[in-house]
């Protein structure tokens, strides 16, 4: 009986190894234009950041150039991607206020050279109040991203935006 169970487990492992090898050899087609994907939910703790980071990392490992924009003041996506996000670091906060461009805030992930991140800092927590008096505040992220993608020497296949609980930034 134990031999049968061991044989089934062995067969299962061999099958898994074969499938993983085939998957590793498969080339995924990359999109011709940049795909911008926002990950949002009005409830906390549902896996927005985990989803963002894992999808971005998996695509970067498959050869895609990926940008993650961390819009959550807690900066968990920035932490997961291994980029600096102390208050004095140029971040998405500085981009939204118009003090810096996305290029100025861009950092390469420690996970993969194809994976880049614009980090968030705790400064972002007060950004919505600071943005109230600014012109076209709802379009600042879109405008900054469009400018960045147009001027960047690198072609980004995917941009993931890890949204905070409040959806004001992603409009």
Image (spheres, rainbow, N blue to C red):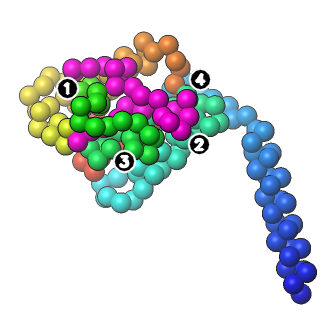
- As drawn, 49 above or below 145: below
- CB atoms of marks 4 and 2 within 8 Å: no
* For marks 2 and 3 on the same chain, the one whose residue lies earlier in the sequence: 2
- As drawn, 71 above or below 12: above
Q: Label 4, label 3: how many angstroms apart (C-alpha)?
A: 30 Å
* For marks 3 and 1 on the same chain, the one whose residue lies earlier in the sequence: 3
Residue hosting label 4: 32
Residue hosting label 2: 58
- CB atoms of marks 1 and 4 within 8 Å: no
Badge 1 marks a residue whose secondary structure is: loop
Residue ID at (59%, 23%) = 32
Is residue 48 on the magenta stretch? no
Q: Label 3, label 1: how many angstroms apart (C-alpha)?
A: 21 Å
Q: State left or right for residue 15 relative to residue 89.
A: right
Badge 3 marks a residue whose secondary structure is: helix
Residue ID at (35%, 52%) = 41
Numbered circle sitting on residue 97: 1
Residue 74 in view: yes
Q: State left or right for residue 164 relative to residue 10.
A: left
Residue ID at (44%, 40%) = 82
- As drawn, 102 above or below 72: above
Numbered circle sitting on residue 76: 3
Q: Quadrant of the N terminus?
A: bottom right
Mark 4, other Cα within 10 Å: few <14 / some 14–19 / many ≥20: few
Q: Position of residue 42 (x, y in %)?
A: 30, 54
């Amino acid at each position: 009986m134990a031999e049968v169970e061991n044989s089934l487990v062995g067969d299962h492992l061999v099958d898994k190894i074969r499938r993983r090898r085939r998957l590793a050899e498969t080339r995924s087609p990359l999109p011709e234009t940049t795909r911008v994907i926002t990950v949002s939910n009005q409830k906390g703790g549902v896996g927005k950041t985990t989803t963002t980071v894992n999808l971005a990392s998996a695509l970067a490992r498959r050869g895609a150039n990926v940008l993650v924009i961390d819009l959550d003041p807690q900066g968990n996506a920035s932490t997961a991607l291994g980029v600096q996000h102390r208050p004095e670091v140029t971040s998405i906060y500085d981009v939204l206020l118009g003090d810096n461009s996305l290029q100025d805030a861009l950092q390469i992930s420690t996970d993969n050279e194809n994976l880049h991140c614009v980090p968030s800092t705790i400064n972002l927590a007060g950004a919505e109040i600071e943005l109230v008096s600014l012109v076209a505040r709802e379009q600042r992220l879109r405008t900054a991203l469009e400018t960045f993608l147009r001027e960047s020497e690198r072609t980004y296949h995917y941009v993931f935006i890890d949204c905070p609980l409040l959806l004001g930034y992603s409009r």
